[in-house]
Image (tube, grey):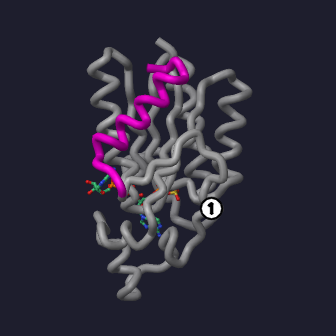
């Protein structure tokens, strides 16, 4: 089967992980080999020691891009729910895939910051508001929204199943599912 990297970029609590896991289930059900490269897990192992400066985030994203491309070029659907706030970091990952001839899709989970901070799955928005942390993406740290993603998902206007179905439809359209 054809591999591909599907990168879900967006703010904390936008719905990246939830959509990736829902899609992973659907794809596995169809017999695809799937890996979800979860940001938190990666930061515990592959990117242990990295923080949230611009440089560290760039390094983190390049490492994940490297691993995703390896998986994708070996027939795996690599789903990547990682913020990747900087356009140039994302562009470098896309170029690497292009050079290797590996399919790459960029999905912007475009949930407004007001909705994300309401969801606040990990309590980070509350901590930032309380002054306990700083440098939170979308609040007091940059998020450069993709200008022309392969798909934009408005997670605040639909269910998780609808969001995953929209992404699944794109994969089908591109001959990847
Ligand atoms: N300051 C700050 N800004 C953003 N995110 C923060 C921060 N501190 C901790 N976290 C948690 O770490 C997760 C983001 O890691 P990523 O590897 O996806 O980020 S990045 O692409 O390197 O910017 C992110 O996970 P998600 O909520 O799943 O996006 C956060 O839970
Ligand atoms: N359409 C949707 N797609 C994804 N998540 C949604 C949607 N609607 C509501 N949610 C909820 O939003 C939250 C998103 O959390 P999570 O997936 O951990 O975000 P992220 O990985 O972007 O930080 C979950 O509690 C999820 O149930």
Counting from the top left corner in percent of width and height, residue 88 is at: 71, 52
Q: State whether label 1 is within 8 Å of ligand 1.
A: no
Quadrant housing residue 100 = top right
Task: Identify the residue at image location x=30%, y=22%.
Answer: 28
* Quarter of image, ligand 1: bottom left
Quadrant housing residue 156 = bottom left
For this orientation, the residue located farthest to the front is 157
Q: How many marks?
A: 1
Does residue 16 show up magenta in the picture? no
SS assignment for the magenta stretch, majority: helix
Is residue 44 at least partly visible in the picture?
no
On screen, residue 50 versus residue 123, left or right, reads right
Callout 1 secondary element = loop
Give the camera-side residue of 56 and 144.
144
Counting from the top left corner in percent of width and height, residue 45 is at: 42, 46
On screen, residue 172 versus residue 100, left or right, reads left
Q: In the image, is residue 86 above or below residue 137?
A: above
- The residue range painted magenta reads 157-177
Counting from the top left corner in percent of width and height, residue 59 is at: 61, 52
Q: In what quadrant of the picture does the C terminus appear?
A: top left
Q: In the image, is residue 37 above or below residue 10?
A: above
Q: Which residue is mark 1?
A: 144
Task: Identify the residue at image location x=64%, y=58%.
Answer: 86
Give the camera-side residue of 131 and 158.
158
Q: Residues within 10 Å of mark 1 (few under 14, many from 20)?
A: few
Counting from the top left corner in percent of width and height, residue 17 is at: 36, 48
């Amino acid at each position: 089967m054809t591999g591909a990297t599907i990168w879900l970029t967006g703010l904390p609590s936008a719905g990246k992980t939830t959509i990736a896991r829902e899609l992973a289930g659907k794809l596995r059900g169809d017999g695809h080999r799937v890996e979800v490269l979860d940001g938190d897990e990666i930061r515990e192992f592959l990117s242990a020691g990295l923080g949230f400066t611009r440089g560290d985030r760039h390094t983190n994203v390049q490492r994940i891009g490297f691993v995703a491309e390896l998986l994708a070029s070996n027939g795996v659907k690599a789903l990547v729910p990682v913020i990747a706030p900087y356009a140039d970091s994302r562009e470098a990952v896309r170029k690497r895939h292009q050079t290797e001839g590996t399919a790459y899709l960029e999905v912007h989970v475009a949930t407004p910051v007001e909705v994300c901070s309401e969801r606040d799955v990990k309590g980070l928005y509350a901590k930032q508001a309380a002054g306990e942390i700083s440098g939170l993406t979308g609040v007091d740290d940059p998020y450069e929204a993709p200008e022309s993603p392969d798909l934009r998902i408005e997670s605040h206007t639909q269910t998780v199943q609808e969001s995953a179905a929209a992404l699944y439809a794109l994969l089908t359209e591109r001959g990847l599912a």
